Image: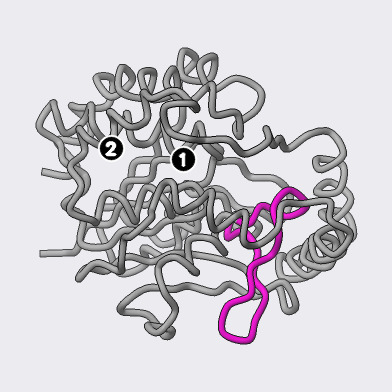
């Protein structure tokens, strides 16, 4: 029997909520994707991956997504991927000339420069913020893969207990995976400096190679220039797959700022409600 993979893409605070709600709704309907043999997490998906492979139940994880920022103790200043950041990303795409690693290097340099100028939170502040979601969790005894990008080389860095860097902690790997360039600081890990794994791909679904079937939850699954979508990557692998993205109701709940914690509860509820539309398809694929 082939191994099954669950791929969790990036999408900010609202992406964590939407993915959690969707997983909870599917499990309630009898399709438990957390039983996957391999879980691949990128950015927001790395947090969800760390949570669902822990001993914390899905219903408890979902309940936490319904809490207000005050109830969660989320006191960090509101962040956003605003117009200036979007312009930096667009300019970097043009300068990269189709080379995804060059794209990573360009954004890596810019992110380092902004961090040095104090234009992003400090590394310590980011660790405190991420700890609100994964504090105390360790690598599971399962095939969990967390992605990041080397800021100096632009190369993919994949972490996990069964990967090439088993000594890198889950805390370090997740912080690196969530280091959105020019919004949050790059994260030093093992002599390297790392940025968000979403710089390479929104979900890095090709890391599910060797698995069949593959289910992808992708809050922001887009093919933009050199960045390939999950569907493109999995079609090239030739594996059975389903890619789920937010429906119209979920998109309204998520809103314009994926980093706004106030949009977390409605995003979680919308994800849970959306699950019903995918039950039959996933039951046939997943078993």
- Report the magenta residues as a range: 179-197
In-image side of 62 versus 111 (left or right): left
The residue that label 2 is drawn on is: 61
Query: Who is closer to the viewer here, 12 or 248?
Result: 12
Q: Is residue 180 magenta?
A: yes
- Whole-percent x, y for residue 39 in the image: 31, 58
The N terminus sits in image quarter: bottom left
Is residue 240 depicted above or below 66 in this figure?
Answer: below
- Whether tag 1 and tag 2 are in contact, CB under 8 A, the answer is no
- Whole-percent x, y for residue 56 in the image: 20, 47
Q: Earlier in the sequence, mark 1 or mark 2?
A: 2
In-image side of 85 versus 274 (left or right): right
The residue that label 1 is drawn on is: 218
* Residue at (61, 34) in percent of width and height: 259
- Whole-percent x, y for residue 24 in the image: 23, 31
Residue 156 numbered tag: none
Q: How is the image coloured?
A: one colour
């Amino acid at each position: 029997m082939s191994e099954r993979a669950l791929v969790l893409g990036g999408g900010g605070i609202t992406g964590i909520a939407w993915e959690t709600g969707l997983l909870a709704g599917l499990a309630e309907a009898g399709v438990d994707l957390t039983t996957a043999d391999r879980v691949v997490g990128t950015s927001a998906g790395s947090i969800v991956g760390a949570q669902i492979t822990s001993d914390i139940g899905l219903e408890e994880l979902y309940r936490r997504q319904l809490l207000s920022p005050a109830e969660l103790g989320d006191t960090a200043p509101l962040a956003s991927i605003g117009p200036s950041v979007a312009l930096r990303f667009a300019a970097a795409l043009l300068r990269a000339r189709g080379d995804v690693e060059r794209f990573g290097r360009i954004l890596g340099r810019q992110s380092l420069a902004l961090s040095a100028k104090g234009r992003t939170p400090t590394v310590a502040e980011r660790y405190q913020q991420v700890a609100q979601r994964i504090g105390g969790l360790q690598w599971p005894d399962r095939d969990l893969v967390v992605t990041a990008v080397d800021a100096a080389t632009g190369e993919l860095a994949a972490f996990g207990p069964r990967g090439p860097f088993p000594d890198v902690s889950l805390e370090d790997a997740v912080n690196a995976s969530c280091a959105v360039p020019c919004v949050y600081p790059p994260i030093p890990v093992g002599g390297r400096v790392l940025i968000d794994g979403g710089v390479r791909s929104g979900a890095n679904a090709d890391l599910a190679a060797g698995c069949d079937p593959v289910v992808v939850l992708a809050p922001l699954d887009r093919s933009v220039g050199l960045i390939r979508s999950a569907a493109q990557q999995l079609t090239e692998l030739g594996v059975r797959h389903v890619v789920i993205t937010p429906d119209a109701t979920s998109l309204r709940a998520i809103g314009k700022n994926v980093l706004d914690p106030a949009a977390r509860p409605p995003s979680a509820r919308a994800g849970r409600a959306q699950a019903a539309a995918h039950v039959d398809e996933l039951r046939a694929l997943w078993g």
